[in-house]
Amino acid sequence: MRIIGFIKTSLLDWDGHVTAVIYLPGCNFRCPFCHNREVVLSSDSMDEVPLEVIEEYYVANSEFLDGIVVTGGEPTVHADLPKLLSRLKALGAKVKLDTNGTNPDMLRDVIGSGLVDYVAMDIKAPLDEKYDDLAGVRVPIDRIKRSIEVLRGSGVDHEFRTTVVPILLAPTDVERIAAYIGGASKYAIQQFRPGDTLDANLAMVKPYPRGAILAMAENAKRYVRKVVVRGDV
């Protein structure tokens, strides 16, 4: 397991928690709005962070750190992810896993083994042919649906989240996602950030205005118990 990024302290990656963040290489999606270009496309050229360094840091700072976030890329593309999570749990750390939901079997296994305390799953688009446009590849929608059901029946704390890109997602799309996960405990609507995106054509796209984002959130509350908005709105 190569680790190609390490943030020692973050207040943004797990609501209400102070965490360290670990980045794993590679992803099976090519989302055009992704900002982790190197992690997705050229992770082999990135320096490796020894797990021992992370473990030593966490132990030395466990008094103020609430846990560790494992993100990417897509962590579940790595067969040895459970081994990494076990090492982190052995430190006494709470662990949050970020995932795109394409590996429901691994998701079920790490939850069932008690290796994660929180899961954040991206839902890129309504669960139809539009998903391919947001993911940048052909997506096995059945796996996305299975992961949603795994989380909903797991008993582990979790959230679903969607990044709203104006030219790719309409407010009605966000409502369709919220309706599909109706009754979910938490749904995060995330503001799109232009700039160094995987698809250079999105670099200059203006994000939705504040009012539009808040309106999407209010509408989503008709279906989901808790809706949060993230990003500069």
Image (spheres, rainbow, N blue to C red):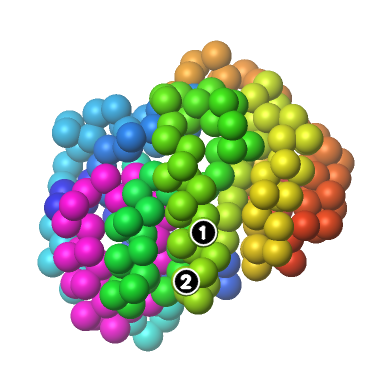
Residue depicted at 24% across the width and 29% down the height: 42
Residue 96 magenta-drawn?
yes
Using the image, determine if residue 179 lies above or below residue 30: below
> Which quarter of the figure has residue 6?
bottom left
Q: Distance between the Cα atoms at labels 1 and 2?
A: 8 Å
Using the image, determine if residue 119 lies above or below residue 46: below
**Callout 2 secondary element:** loop
| Three-letter code, disc 2 | Ser
In the image, 75 versus 14, the foreground residue is 75
Label for residue 103?
none
15 horizontally vs 3: left or right: right
The magenta span reads: 74-100
Residue 210 in sight here: no
Quadrant assignment for the C terminus: top right
> Which quarter of the figure has residue 209?
top right
Residue 81 appears at what percent x and percent y? 23, 58
Tally the marks: 2
223 horizontally vs 55: left or right: right
| Three-letter code, disc 1 | Glu
Q: Which residue is mark 1?
A: 149
Q: Label 2: how many residues lie within 10 Å, few (<14), some (14-19) or many (20+)?
A: some
